[in-house]
Amino acid sequence: MNINKAAIDDTVLALLHLTLHDHNRAWKGFDWDSLNRLYERGFIGDPVNKTKSVVLTDDGLRESERLFKQLFSTAGNKID
């Protein structure tokens, strides 16, 4: 089966938006390959460290929010 890794990465980035805390940190309980690709794309800091969270870059914060709204919002409903 061919897998669209970019779509998976976009979904992971959107889901990181759900676990944001301390303004720009998110829990890193996702596939390491996907987290590494998001790091290579400049959306998160290096996920290889001892902390249980990753730091989203400014671009990562903007893109995670955009993707979250695009993928998971319903028309006419405000996301809290």
Image (tube, rainbow, N blue to C red):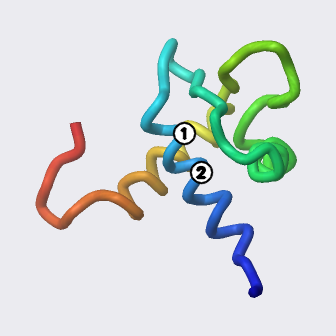
Q: Amino acid at mark 2?
A: Val
The image shows residue 73, relative to residue 22, as above or below, that is below
Q: Amino acid at mark 1?
A: Leu
Between 24 and 15, the one lying in front of the other is 15
Between 33 and 56, the one lying in front of the other is 33
Mark sitting on residue 65 = none
Q: Are marks 1 and 2 in contact (CB under 8 Å)?
A: yes
Residue found 36% across the figure and 55% down from its top: 69
Q: Choose top left, top right, bottom left or bottom right for residue 42.
A: top right
Under tag 1, what secondary structure?
A: helix
| 74 left or right, relative to 11 | left
Residue placed under numbered mark 2 in the picture? 12
Under tag 2, what secondary structure?
A: helix
Residue found 84% across the figure and 45% down from its top: 36
- Residue 63 x/y as whole percent: 56, 49
Between the C-alphas of marks 1 and 2, the distance is 6 Å
Residue found 59% across the figure and 27% down from its top: 27
- Residue found farthest to the front: 1
Crowding at mark 2 (Cα within 10 Å: few <14, some 14-19, many 20+): many
Residue placed under numbered mark 1 in the picture? 16
